[in-house]
Amino acid sequence: MTDWTTPMRQHTHQALAEVALRLVHSLRTSLGEPAAQPLAGAPVDVSSAMAFAQAFAASHTATSSANAPASHPLARLRSLASATTGELAADLILLSCLPEWHEGLATLCRLLHPQGQPRPTVTLALSWLESEQPARSAALRDDIEDLLLRSPLARLGLINLQGEGPWHGRTLLPGEGLWDALMARQPASLIHPLIAGYAQVPGLDAWLQQGEVLQAVAALRRGLPCQVLLIGGDAAMRQTRVRALLGAAQTTAVRHRLLEPAPTSQQGAVPASLLPALAQAWLYQASLWIEDRHDPLNADQQDAAPSLDTSWPGAIALPVLSSAAQDRHLPQLDLPQIRLPVLALPAIARRQLWRTLLPQLGDQVNVLAARYPIEPDDARDVVRDLALRQDLVDLPLHLDDVGACVRARTATLSRPGLSRVLPQADWSALLVPQAATAQLQSAVRRVLQQLTVLDDWGFAQGRRDRRGVRMLFYGPPGTGKTLAAEVMAKALGVDLLVVDLSSLVSKWIGETEKNLAAVFDVAERSRALLLFDEADALFGKRTDTQDAQDRYANLETAYLLQRLERYEGVAVLTTNLRSQLDAAFSRRFEFIVEFPEPDAPVRAALWRLHLPEQAPLAPDVDLAELADWYALSGAQIKNAALAGAFLAASAGQHIHQRHFLWAIEREFDKAGRAHPGYPAHHEAPDTHLPRPLTEDTP
């Protein structure tokens, strides 16, 4: 038990004991006057319960401290109103908590309750308090009715009335968290937990030194009534910054999550779901944190948010932290505001983040910062995963280990039109002209060196369009464009996100742009390489406006131009015909890479690449001849190699040249191209299927 907990509990015990003694004295007086009989019908054994209550309470008044700590809820409650109203509110609160203090007091309440509940009733409170002040009995009754039904005490739910019928016949219940606060315990509520701040948040040091952030920290530390708005980003980004603010201010907050769309209410109406959290924040001298969890990728519902009544100083005389993707989702408070936009960590902060968390990889922090635009909470989880791996496998920490943990921790959000690919192919699998390979490798180096050039050397110059890499791959089908994107993702240590354009385009106005915005947001959050395969349909040329359809198609293209320019990751567009793309895209691409049809040496290398070492090749197989004679793309060579192998296996033979020739002929037929014939020393292969399948067929 801490030093501050002991005096808090001692004063609560003393206050409860005093109320219990006053209540017992009132009961003895009332039961000893048969003419009045305010408690007619009380069981005969109530006297023994009163005797216990009196002895138990007296034992605590003898040992308790008389001075209330200034932070005690009862002391602060008395300071909020006049002496009469404050004392009356404290008496009602303590009366409702008597059954929580000891089972003997709960038994006394049960014996006095008409339905036998172990709780005090309003009737009991009226009888007790009116007996102490008979001269102002009528005024006292009015004050109690106002406190229980119409005051901020009632609106906040510090005392609740249970039951039906007239108000004076109902049961008194302590509000949520009230007993825990009086006993200086952490709140037991899982719905409205007390959230502590972070002592240190790597990567947010520079953010915490910004002017408006320092003002917010000072307001939180002093407990000034204000609203600190953290708007933008995703829920994890906002949560990290809220807890960084709490840590810097050395305070806590009671969190209330808006899990459902908040209903619209009139000015002055308090949302019922917010009252328990508001009460707990006041009880614990904490800030109130209103957190909207709706992700803009999945929710654009919610009309105007509700407003709060601030007529009573105690109702909202505390700092309020509000975090949401958009401020229109949050309750409107009549409080001074400090607005803090939530943005992704800048590259310099990401470098400091990795340097702090992984000092053993200090010489590679630039690469980590460029590869993984990760948030501090996510980075901490990754470091914990790495520590577990190091304990299980005693091997030096490698950059690829970090990438594996990041991918495991940053699973792609569920979104129609996106498929996640874990890249497997490396540079050895990509057989393209040297000029294309050089451009691809240059693009990878540009990503990894962005921090040095843009931040350390100052080339960013405050412009967002300097970040990220946008690339166009063009060339005939099957020449390795998609494979090149996978190889780049593998080299960067990130996943590949492939966009299905057919599921994004909508006939409804504005839906296509919204779907595309969600795709870019998902790609930025999942730290993946974004691939628009066969992008002609979506990134096509703008045309003269002939009708409404042309107009909105041009709007979609214009939106794509702007969003692509702001994208800070790696975006790859592939097309078979470069001429089909709008010319305005060209200047936005840092790299435009051509993938031509492979020449004979490249085709020979492709044949060797797609034939594994253990493949049973017959002596007559001549890969150089196949490469020289048949102009196939890389994808066609892969298909032909596989089809020839299946044909040989079906016939129960080794793979002969005729099997490849037959498969090549099929590839020409599929492409609608004329077959060039066969070398002079080869006859046309038997294109009939192998012998029919029987029980004896291997």
Image (cartoon, rainbow, N blue to C red):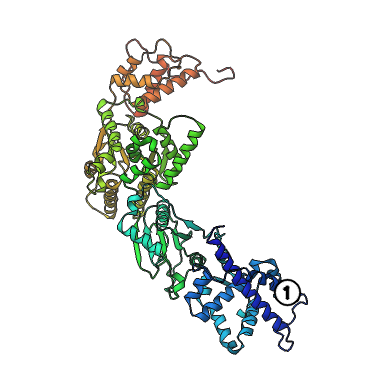
Residue 176 visible to an observer of this rendering: no
Q: Position of 188 compared to 269: left or right?
A: right
Horizontal side of 196 relative to 604 (left or right) equals: right
Q: Tag 1: Cα neighbours inside 10 Å, few (<14), some, or many (≥20)? A: few
Which percent across, then down, holds residue 388? 50, 37
x and y percent of residue 396 in the render? Answer: 43, 30
Q: Secondary structure at mark 1?
A: helix
Quadrant containing the N terminus is bottom right
Q: As displayed, is residue 619 above or below residue 536? A: above
Viewer-proximal residue among 574 and 20: 20
Q: Is residue 404 above or below residue 693?
A: below
Query: Given the image, on which type of amino acid does mark 1 rest?
Result: Ala
Give residue 480's position: percent from left, percent from top.
33, 30
- Work out whether residue 502 can be spotted: yes
Based on the displayed image, in which of its 4 quarters is residue 146 positioned?
bottom right
Q: Residue at x 40, y 44 (%)?
A: 417
Q: Residue at x 64, y 67 (%)?
A: 101
Q: Position of residue 311 (x, y in %)?
A: 43, 76
Residue under label 1: 51
Look at the image and tell me in which quarter the C terminus lies: top right
